[in-house]
Amino acid sequence: MLASDRPGFGPRAGKWFSERLGLKNLSYPIPEHANSLGYMLGGITLIGFIILAITGIYLAQFYQPHPNEAHRSIVYIITGAPLGDIVRSIHYWTVQIVMVTVILHMIRVVFSGAYKRPRELNWYVGLALLALTFGFIFTGTVLKYDQEGLEALQHYKGAVDLLGVFGTWFSEGFSRSLPLLTRLYTAHVTILPLAFVLLVLVHLHLIKVHGISPQVVPGATTRATAGEGTSRFTDHAWRLAGFGLLLLGLTIAISLLFPAPIGKAGIPGPEMTKPWWMFVWIVPAEEIWGIRALLIVPGVLGLFLALLPIIDRTPTSASTTENSCWGQPVWSLPSSL
């Protein structure tokens, strides 16, 4: 073979990694509708969390998790750290977008009946991931330690007090050697990420075992689809990578136009701020029941979602709409979406 006939360095390197990492095994069949936008929301959310992890690691290099220094360190990130303002803004806006994709993903799962047999366990894993997502948002809000963050911490203390002995581990008095803010920071950067990674691995494993839930068409049943389909997971992964680049580009653009806000250092006293939009649904209940609403409303909603696979055991998909936008390819989505 002439030297000119040999593959270039790129193809040879690709073949080398493919052989040693078993990348060919990723080219397993999946249904074509798995490449539709509705069925890719979970993957887009995961990419968002990867962006959050990378930007969070950078921000942690400048953050001081102590009540006397926390807000001041955020101000330094914005005004003094290299690229600190843009990185923090990317982190902030990615949270907003991820929360939207999480909600849409959950709606799609319910709409397509993907919480039914044989995917009940994965539904519960998804609910746990949803709870962790709210945990990330809450602890991240507190870490700013501006007025909004301080009031979020006050709500947290009130809810923990209502738990009595069951809230001891979460209470301020559990550890006298560290401020509660420092412990919440530890949860934000270690405990929650560890739990999240473990649950994501289980989530992905169960998706691989049972396959993508069937497309929502009349008479469709929520059976396992592993090994079926005319598309390939590698094609799906490339599409996800494209959406990931779009997500990153969108957050960078928004961050340049609208830098992440930061309030003044928090002052204990009457409530002066409103929670983020993903928590406003609790506000009306809080006005009626007070701090107890922080336990009652999420508890009732969580119980309902947990009972959903038990209440609804029908084998068909939740919707029988033939032309559902959730199952159409991303390049043929209706303009109304």
Image (cartoon, helix red, strand yellow):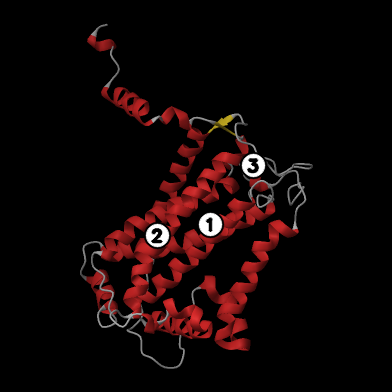
Residue closest to the eye, 157 or 151: 157
Three-letter amino acid code at the position of disc 3: Gln
Task: Point out residue 195 in the picture as x, y percentages from the top left corner.
Answer: 44, 59
**Label pair 1/2, CB-CB below 8 angstroms:** no
Q: Is residue 160 above or below residue 11?
A: below
Task: Bin the neighbour count of mark 2 within 10 Å (Cα to Cα): few under 14, some 14-19, many 20 and up.
Answer: some
Residue closest to the eye, 136 or 196: 196
Q: Is residue 154 above or below residue 240?
A: below
Residue 268, can we see it? yes
Q: Is residue 127 left or right of residue 315?
A: left
Give the spatial CA distance, label 2 vs label 3: 33 Å
Say which residue label 3 marks: 328
Q: Residue at x 26, y 75 (%)?
A: 75
Give the image quarter of residue 285: bottom right
**Quadrant of the frame with the N terminus:** top left
Residue closest to the eye, 254 or 265: 265
Give the image quarter of residue 179: bottom left
Q: Residue at x 69, y 48 (%)?
A: 117
Say which residue label 1 marks: 101
Q: Is residue 7 above or below residue 173?
A: above
Three-letter amino acid code at the position of disc 1: Thr
Q: Secondary structure at mark 1?
A: helix
Residue at far front of view: 165
Give the spatial CA distance, label 1 vs label 2: 19 Å
Q: Please tell me whether mark 3 or mark 1 is closer to you in this view.
A: 1
Q: Is residue 320 left or right of residue 64?
A: right
Say which residue label 2 marks: 193
Q: Residue at x 55, y 55 (%)?
A: 125
